[in-house]
Image (cartoon, rainbow, N blue to C red):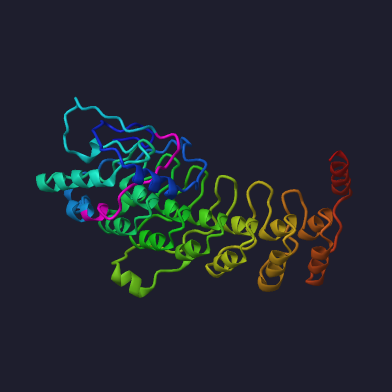
């Protein structure tokens, strides 16, 4: 078994990419995740080599030929290591995908060799960053290759995590590929796998204000989709009350980014608009007040009849009291107009707030 944090098993020679390819790679890089090198401690799936878990190498060879290169996934990746003295076994596992300018055409030749020898392809093989071929295809924004891989891979392979604990579904959201998100959902990818920060794919979509990806993760499967893709046992949306490791649900992340459109989708899907985040007990309404986001506060007050006006934070403060402490007098007035309890915050909180202002 190859650990998601471990090195590749062996090394073979891979032709260096041309300068044009290197320029294309530099232009195509996506700096989407500062935590790409985070050691998540996750291990990859076991090497499933049974024939029913291996797709046609011919179809993938065709797909790989669509794109010329794979972009780098981290700036600190090493250059290709060439060991001419090592015997070439012809196995894909011998390919060490470590360089930013790794040439997919060479991988195609490997697949063609495997096809001609009828050897099985280890689709769960991971490079030094823990990325599988599916991860790399998403990085490269190669929609045709992604389609072929997803269509052939067994569902467990879709959930393999790289060193940042990102599955293909996480990456599709981070790379803003809503069609790929839906394709993975229909193929049975898990919606509740967490990355190194406890985020599901939906957490990432909400935190990035990515409405299109959020919709693909929230929209229930239609009968036509289920019939066309032979979907069984896939539940959409996921459990919407899951916390990430910062104690936040998708509602909290959408509120923090001020994405009213995503909040509407979450509410329509059944999310609890009054959910408290785990550290301070803030609801979406508290967050809107702390950030001084009047548009968000008005949306919650006008269009969310179930919003709890007098819910307290873990510090015992209501939305009205928090508005007074934050000197958000307009929001405080709107709260009382809609029936919020106009009780002032405790003296100790007012004094503490004044002391903080003097210190600052």
Q: Toward which corner of the image does residue 252 lie, by quadrant?
A: bottom right
Residue 120 at x, y = what percent?
Answer: 17, 45
Q: Is residue 130 magenta?
A: no
Residue 341 shows up from this direction: no
197 left or right, relative to 120: right
- Residue drawn at x 63%, y 48% is 278
Q: Residue furthest bottom?
A: 224
Residue 86 shows up from this direction: yes
72 left or right, relative to 301: left
Q: Toward which corner of the image does residue 265 lie, by quadrant?
A: bottom right
Residue 74 at x, y = what percent?
Answer: 44, 39
- Residue drawn at x 35%, y 46% is 20
215 left or right, relative to 128: right
Q: Residue furthest left?
A: 117
- Position of 141 relative to 4 (above/below): below
In the picture, the quarter occupied by the C terminus is top right
In the picture, the quarter occupied by the N terminus is top left
Q: How many marks?
A: 0
332 left or right, relative to 155: right
Dominant secondary-structure state across the stretch colored magenta: loop
**Magenta region: which residues?**
62-77
Residue 151 at x, y = what percent?
Answer: 27, 59
Residue toward you, 355 or 146 = 146
């Amino acid at each position: 078994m190859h650990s998601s944090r471990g090195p590749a098993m062996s090394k073979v020679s891979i032709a260096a990419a041309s300068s044009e390819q290197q320029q294309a790679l530099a232009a195509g890089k996506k700096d989407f995740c500062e935590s790409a090198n985070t050691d998540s401690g996750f291990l990859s799936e076991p090497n499933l080599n049974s024939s029913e878990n291996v797709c046609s190498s011919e179809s993938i060879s065709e797909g790989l030929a669509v794109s010329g290169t794979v972009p780098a996934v981290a700036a600190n990746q090493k250059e290709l290591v060439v060991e001419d003295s090592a015997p070439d076994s012809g196995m894909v596992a011998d390919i060490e995908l470590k360089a930013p300018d790794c040439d997919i055409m060479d991988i195609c030749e490997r697949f063609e060799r495997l096809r001609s020898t009828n050897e099985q392809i280890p689709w769960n093989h991971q490079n030094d960053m823990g990325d599988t071929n599916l991860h790399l295809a998403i990085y490269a924004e190669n929609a045709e290759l992604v389609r072929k891989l997803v269509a052939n891979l067994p569902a467990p392979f879709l959930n393999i995590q790289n060193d940042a604990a990102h599955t293909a579904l996480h990456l599709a959201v981070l790379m803003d590929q809503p069609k790929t998100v839906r394709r993975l959902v229909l193929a049975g990818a898990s919606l509740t796998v967490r990355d190194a920060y406890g985020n599901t794919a939906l957490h990432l979509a909400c935190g990035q204000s990515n409405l299109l990806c959020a919709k693909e993760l929230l929209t229930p499967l239609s009968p036509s989709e289920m019939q066309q893709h032979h979907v069984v046992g896939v539940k959409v949306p996921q459990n919407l009350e899951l916390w990430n490791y910062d104690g936040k649900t998708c509602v909290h992340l959408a509120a923090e980014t001020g994405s009213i459109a995503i909040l509407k989708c979450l509410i329509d899907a059944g999310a609890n608009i009054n959910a408290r985040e785990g550290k301070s007990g803030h609801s979406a309404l508290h967050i809107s007040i702390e950030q001084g986001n009047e548009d968000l506060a008005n949306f919650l007050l006008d269009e969310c009849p179930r919003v709890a006006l007098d819910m307290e934070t873990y510090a015992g403060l209501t939305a009205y009291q928090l508005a007074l402490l934050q000197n958000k007098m307009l929001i405080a007035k709107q709260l009382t107009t809609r029936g919020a309890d106009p009780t002032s915050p405790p003296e100790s909180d007012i004094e503490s707030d004044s002391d903080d202002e003097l210190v600052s």
